[in-house]
Amino acid sequence: MLPLPPLLLLLLAGPARPISFQLPGKARKCLREEIHRDTLVTGEYEIGAPPGSSAGPAANLKITDSAGHILYAKEDATKGKFAFTTEDYDMFEACFESKLPVGTGRMPDQLVILDMKHGVEAKNYEEIAKVEKLKPLEVELRRLEDLSESIVNDFAYMKKREEEMRDTNESTNTRVLYFSIFSMCCLIGLATWQVFYLRRFFKAKKLIE
């Protein structure tokens, strides 16, 4: 396999930016992302109190997979961290649900900040350097090696999905071909039966000999 261009590595190695959004009272907002299997996922979140409000932040956080399994849950979440490792390639969902009442007046929205990382971004290379006593250059090489491996795995997964889709298309085309042949045989059989039936009918009526 050809080595990846340095520019591509630099672009993909850029740090991910946190996501921030407004959470109205009694509202529920969810963020979804597809993540590969056996991937470390870490995240930090912070929920700010509505500006000008004496009440503190009030929201629940729940992270689940497509099957509804709870990977992380926190009630009355204000600020914290979470981490888990995926078991299968799946769609994961992080939902924030506000507990603030809507009220009669306009309640200011809560500000939610979520910084979610996975794969190479989630690894703490400073801690790895301390444990394995690596030099800064070795740490950078380790990070680039992990990044390259992650890219190769992504390409391998895309190739696998492409093969599965091609197999599905070929199977569908084969079924359509067999169904078309079966339909044609049925039509030919029906037309032949109609010819013989009409011939007998006309002979019975003595319209033809």
Image (cartoon, grey):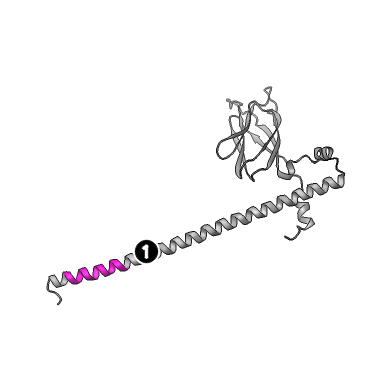
Is 196 a magenta residue? yes
Residue 117 percent location from the top left of the image: 71, 41
Which image quadrant for residue 162?
Answer: bottom right
Report crowding for label 1: few under 14, some 14 to 19, many 20 or more residues within 10 A (C-alpha).
few
For disc 1, the marked residue is: 182
* Main secondary structure type of the part rendered in magenta: helix
Residue 145 percent location from the top left of the image: 77, 50
Q: Quadrant of the N terminus?
A: bottom right
Seen in the picture, residue 182 relative to 107 is either above or below; the reply is below
Residue 122 percent location from the top left of the image: 73, 41
The residue positioned 61% from the left and 43% from the top of the image is 88
Which image quadrant for residue 176?
Answer: bottom left
Which image quadrant for residue 97?
Answer: top right
Q: Secondary structure at mark 1?
A: helix
Is 134 a magenta residue? no
Question: For the residue marked with disc 1, what is the amino acid?
Answer: Phe
Residue 134 percent location from the top left of the image: 85, 43
Residue at the front extreme, as displayed:
132
The residue positioned 51% from the left and 61% from the top of the image is 170
Give the magenta-colored segment's residue range. 188-200
**174 and 96: which one is in front?**
174
The residue positioned 76% from the left and 55% from the top of the image is 8
**135 and 8: which one is in front?**
135
196 displayed left or right of 11: left
**161 and 14: which one is in front?**
161
Residue at the top extreme, as displayed:
54
The residue positioned 67% from the left and 52% from the top of the image is 154
3 displayed left or right of 196: right
